Image (tube, rainbow, N blue to C red):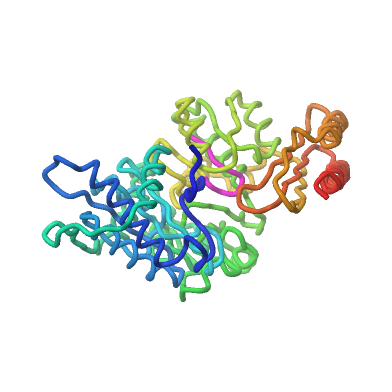
Amino acid sequence: MGKKYFGTDGIRGRVGNDVINPEFVLKLGWAVGKVFAEDRRGKSSLGKVLIGKDTRISGYMFESALEAGLVAAGIDVALMGPMPTPAIAYLTRTFNAQAGIVISASHNAYHDNGIKFFSSNGTKLPDELELRIEAQLDKPMTTVESNQLGRVTRIDDAAGRYIEFCKSTVPTGFNLEGMTIVVDCAHGATYHVAPAVLRELGARVIEIGVDPDGININDGVGSTSPALLQKTVVEQHADLGVALDGDGDRLIMVDHAGDLVDGDELLYIIACDQLQTSGCNGVVGTLMSNLGFELALADLDIPFVRAQVGDRYVIEKMVQNDWKLGGESSGHIICADVTTTGDGMVAALKVLLAVRSSERNLRDLRSGMSKFPQRMINVKLASKINLVEQPDIQSAVSDAETRLGSRGRVLLRPSGTEPVVRVMVEGENGPLVGQIAQELAEVVERAVA
């Protein structure tokens, strides 16, 4: 059975649309509460759900709506205020909560928002539970008797708890003394925790993107807009820069020369360090992971597999293979030896651990991996299309793969969030990659016209 509301990472959209509005979110909170109340039946206490959010202005409205819906269903609520998504996953486990809810649209602009969920063990909700919640949404909303209503509390020390957790993911005695680090918090949920983590570990910290006003989240700052970070690192003669996205689950870094270090390169650095210390039995990437990354891991005899795009699918492959490291080129990095979900701050500390233990800078550490030129073109769709059933497209793909040879690849992928087909080509020869990508895009355009 397909899901009506839940996507690969909760429910997301523009504020005021059919689902990201106060009325629906109130009903969603109630539906979640009803399902969790059913699972608590026969137990001595009510369930507890944690709610955190990023810094966008609509978060306050949706926090109140979720709170009211959960309480009406008889579920206790603990509010944490602005907190990174991975912090909610961690705190859900440590507080023995039945679930954690994050109000965030991640790296999107302020006018979007979303609701995503973590289970009691800090992982994404299983499909079965999401389907039960959707079924409950179709029922009329009711309220439990007054003596059965949930109660609401606030967790005042949530930020401090998460800061200590982040520091606990590196070895005792690890410090960043003598390093100057620029950290860009995207005016998002890490503004009050990421600088503190680095500073408490001894670094000299220069902060940008730490003045949220409700509408400036991800606006010209953060992991999706790193130009200011690059400029600041060079101007301040910093050792490196750390860029997080609006909800703190995505990481991009900048070396001392101001050059970007993306998710594939960061995963490579972490894998190399783990190979020298605790060992690295394999890495999960995605269909978008650079071929140069895959070949660099092969040179180290580190197994590599690709999952569908999305951290949910990366984690599934990690569990299947019993591997502890995976992620996406966009900067979602999962270090399953210490946490259950993508965590930008934890991943940054893993990279910094590699820098300190090797006594090499970030630029040198990523030099063992050569990224292949990659070109992606989005072709707009008027309606859904089955690419496999288009002979002209399949013929063009086959021809492109022949021209690229064994050290190149082609990927045509319908977007899960936009009405487009993503045409991606990569290989060693940059001009050829660009030419083939353009030719393939034109073939797709003709087929969908």
| Count of numbered marks | 0
* Secondary structure mostly seen in the magenta stretch: loop
- Considering only vertical position in the picture, is 284 above or below 229? above
Residue 226, position as x, y percentages in the image: 62, 62
Expressed as whole percent of the image width and height from the top left, the position of residue 377 reads: 77, 50
Camera sees residue 208 = no
Question: At which x and y percent is residue 319?
Answer: 45, 29
Of 82 and 23, nearer the camera is 23
> Is residue 343 found left or right of 119 in the rendered image?
right
Q: Is residue 210 visible?
A: yes
Q: Please name whichever residue, 126 or 232, is drawn nearer the observer in this view of the structure.
A: 126
Residue 358 within the segment the image draws in magenta: no
Q: Residue at x 58, y 34 (%)?
A: 307
The residue nearer to you, when weighing 76 against 449, is 449
The residue furthest front is 140
- Name the residue located 80 percent from the left edge and 47 percent from the top edge: 448
Residue 327 is left or right of residue 128, and the answer is: right
Question: In this rendering, would 374 be left or right of 219?
Answer: right
Give, as a single range, the part of the protein colored magenta: 325-332
- In-image side of 304 versus 196 (left or right): right
Instruction: Give the x, y percent position of residue 372.
Output: 75, 40
The quadrant in which residue 365 appears is top right
Relative vertical location of residue 447 with respect to residue 159 in this rendering, above or below:
above
